[in-house]
Image (cartoon, helix red, strand yellow):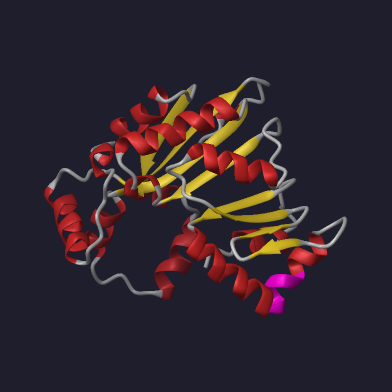
Amino acid sequence: MDTLFWRLKDENLLPRKYFEVDFPMIVARKIHNIKSKPPLSKPIMESHSGDSLLIDSHSLESSRYSIVGADLRFSSDLEEKLKKHNLDIHLPTLLVAECVLVYMTPQQSANLLKWAASTFPVAMFINYEQVNMTDRFGQIMIENLQRRQCNLAGVEVCRSLDSQRERLLLNGWETARAIDMMKVYSFLPQADVKRIEGLEFLDEKELFEQLMQHYCICWASKDSSNLGLANITF
């Protein structure tokens, strides 16, 4: 269960409004957990202003948090549901996808990216997923997932960092960058690295490095207000 909203609230870092989108079946389970567990429901109530919460089996609407059941492959339905939950497209917006686009066909992910780029005039899109999937290690990853009946429909876009950047630029985003997770790991403060490695001893460091080289973070921006989004980097 993604707990980012609750962590941001604990750190007093909530945005104007936090939206979460997942398949309706997943959303129904999460709403059940929220309603039945006070540590989840209380922060939503504390941050809410106005009338009572709007809640049904596949959505929850408060003034600071909304969760919506929708299929990202159908952007018109997604947009309609988000607007019902008071999405303000004119606010600077951060969109985050974690291992989401790779499960769509390249055309479906392109349509989603085009919709986002055309809908939000000031926005950043951050994508975390696989990369370098055409080498032998990448092929083994794909084969292992296929044996578990898990098909990566969009894996052809995960050929390289360049192909990841290109997809963003071809679908309406003004700037795009990408780095693999080994690079991200190298940027972490050494004190944090030592703490992390102390929690779990890395006896297969070469395997760890290979795995990190096959995941990446890509980020893209549109900035009609000249906020300097293109300059944000690691």
Image quarter of residue 86: top right
Dominant SS of magenta comes to helix
Residue 232 seen from this side: yes
The vertical placement of 9 against 75, above or below, is below
Nearest to the observer: residue 8 or residue 55: 55
Q: How many marks?
A: 0
Magenta stretch: includes residue 13: no
In the image, is 27 to the left or to the right of 137? right
Q: Residue at x 23, y 39 (%)?
A: 156
Nearest to the observer: residue 16 or residue 67: 67
Q: Residue at x 72, y 78 (%)?
A: 38
Give residue 29's position: percent from left, percent from top: 54, 71
In the image, is 124 to the left or to the right of 150? right
Give residue 40's position: percent from left, percent from top: 68, 72
Query: Magenta part of the protein: which range?
Result: 37-42
Q: Residue at x 72, y 64 (%)?
A: 10
The vertical placement of 120 against 9, above or below, is above
Residue 234 seen from this side: no
Give residue 97's position: percent from left, percent from top: 47, 47
In the image, is 97 to the left or to the right of 150? right
